[in-house]
């Protein structure tokens, strides 16, 4: 009977398995006998995509990702909300006005010698060029994250997605790692207007240093980053011993991992650490940066993950049934990144997808298999069982971590 339903639907949308009640999905579908409907907001518009397509290191990644999500018919399972670019004032809720004014000025200047010492001071120059359009694309990406966070705060949805967000290296007064505006910090500050304790999780290949720095001295936001940590690897921070300062001591968690990490080790560590985080921090909302540069085939060539472990991490967070903000991040093999974020979108919307990628505008990028799934490379996972065991033990057994307080609703919410 299940198979009979796997026919190509009249709307010629791709074959995707219907849920047990034979519904083909659609936000007004009353789904019986399944997980309670999680209303999902997907931040997107034509303007948003064309602006985010201009993000230099991931050209057209926004549109390529959106096209697969659309080709699988997933838009009908979500509420699509168009964002506006973040305003100067909104951006300066985190960033210094000096930095943002300098960024705006340099982006409007086409003199190749524009990088003066002020530019250097703000991290703008040859490693983070302030080319024409950089400010616009960064402010649109940030507007997407703010719109997603606002949808969660207003209770319009339980999950909100901005695949063009996730720029985790940007600092209060400097660009870093090709991140110019830290949309994640802005989104977390927005969530903090309603939620007392917000958790940030970062599964990008790189340490989420910009977000950690922003909240390292407060107990209201816990940051947990899983990343490659090895001498000379960017940004070089995020060791186990990096656990927060002052009132934030014990509210920063870092999970350093070695070269070649594969799905099994990655998810094992993720689940063990997050089980502890849930008990000790008891978050009211969670933000997950789903950077895909740890995937096999990424030019970063560091971890050896597939979309299965990253999707399983998101699936795990869904079981907490608290507001969830999902963001993108790194991911330089653009078709694999699109595969990953499509897979995650299908998990969040409770939609089973055929692994045959449907025909669509960028179909040729997925050859020769045209398969949604990716295979791990054959590089060894250098995370030995003892390294994994040690990392988990150090996090779960440390007295200063997650100082376990009984969370009494307090009227003074600021630290
Ligand atoms: C320039 C890019 C961003 C791209 N790239 C590779 C992949 C593709 C071609 C080279 C890098 O190593 N980059 C970087 C260079 C300097 C500092 C940081 C990064 C990446 C940060 C990141 O992804 N954080 O999550
Ligand atoms: Zn990265």
Image (spheres, rainbow, N blue to C red):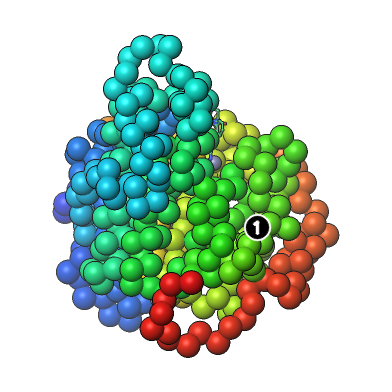
- Picture coordinates of residue 252, whole percent (x, y): 61, 62
Query: Above or below — where is 362 with respect to 391?
Result: above
Query: Above or below — where is 285 with respect to 262?
Result: below
Residue occupying the far right of the picture: 386
Local packing at callout 1 (Cα closer than 10 Å; few below 14, some 14-19, many 20+) is: many
Residue at the spot of label 1? 254
Question: Can residue 91 be seen in the rendering of this structure?
Answer: yes
Q: Is residue 385 left or right of residue 362?
A: right
Q: Nearer the viewer, residue 200 or 215?
A: 215
Name the quarter where the N terminus is drawn. Answer: bottom left
Q: Quadrant of residue 284?
A: bottom left
Name the element at disc 1. Answer: strand
Numbered circles on residues, count: 1
- Picture coordinates of residue 137, whole percent (x, y): 31, 35
Q: Residue at x 27, y 62 (%)?
A: 150
Q: Nearer the viewer, residue 254 or 339?
A: 254
Q: Nearer the viewer, residue 68 or 150?
A: 150
**Is the CB of mark 1 within 8 Å of ligand 1?**
no
């Amino acid at each position: 009977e299940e198979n009979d339903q796997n026919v190509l639907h009249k709307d010629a949308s791709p074959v995707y398995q219907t849920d047990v009640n034979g519904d083909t999905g659609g936000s007004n579908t009353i789904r019986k006998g399944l997980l309670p409907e999680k209303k999902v907001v997907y931040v997107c518009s034509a303007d948003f995509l064309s602006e985010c397509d201009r993000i230099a290191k991931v050209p057209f990644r926004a549109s390529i990702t959106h096209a697969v999500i659309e080709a699988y018919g997933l838009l009908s399972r979500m509420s699509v909300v168009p964002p506006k670019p973040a305003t100067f004032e909104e951006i300066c809720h985190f960033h210094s006005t000096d930095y943002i004014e300098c960024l705006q000025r340099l982006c409007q200047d086409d003199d190749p010698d524009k990088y003066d010492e002020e530019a250097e001071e703000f991290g703008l120059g040859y490693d983070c060029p302030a080319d024409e359009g950089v400010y616009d694309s960064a402010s649109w990406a940030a507007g997407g994250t703010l719109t997603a966070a606002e949808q969660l705060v207003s209770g319009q949805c339980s999950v909100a997605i901005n695949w063009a967000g996730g720029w985790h290296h940007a600092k209060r007064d400097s660009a870093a790692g090709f991140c110019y505006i830290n949309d994640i910090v802005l989104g977390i500050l927005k969530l903090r207007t309603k939620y007392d304790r917000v958790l940030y999780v970062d599964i990008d290949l790189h340490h989420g240093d910009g977000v950690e720095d922003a909240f390292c001295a407060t107990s209201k936001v816990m940051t947990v980053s899983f990343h490659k940590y090895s001498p000379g690897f960017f940004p070089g921070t995020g060791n186990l011993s990096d656990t927060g300062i002052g009132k934030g001591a014990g509210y920063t968690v870092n999970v350093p991992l070695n070269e070649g990490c594969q799905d099994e080790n990655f998810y094992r560590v993720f689940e063990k650490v997050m089980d502890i985080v849930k008990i000790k921090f008891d978050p009211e909302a969670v933000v997950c940066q789903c950077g895909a540069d740890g995937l096999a085939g990424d030019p970063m060539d560091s971890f050896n993950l597939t979309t299965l472990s990253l999707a399983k991490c998101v699936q795990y967070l869904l079981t907490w049934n608290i507001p969830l903000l999902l963001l993108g991040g790194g991911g330089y093999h653009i078709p694999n990144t699109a595969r990953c974020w499509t897979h995650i979108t299908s998990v969040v919307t409770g939609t089973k997808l055929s692994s045959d990628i449907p025909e669509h505008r960028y179909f040729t990028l997925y050859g020769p298999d045209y398969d949604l799934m990716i295979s791990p490379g054959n590089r060894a996972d250098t995370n030995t069982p003892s390294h994994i065991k040690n990392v988990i033990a150090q996090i779960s057994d440390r007295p200063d971590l997650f100082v376990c307080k009984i969370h009494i609703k307090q009227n003074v919410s600021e630290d």
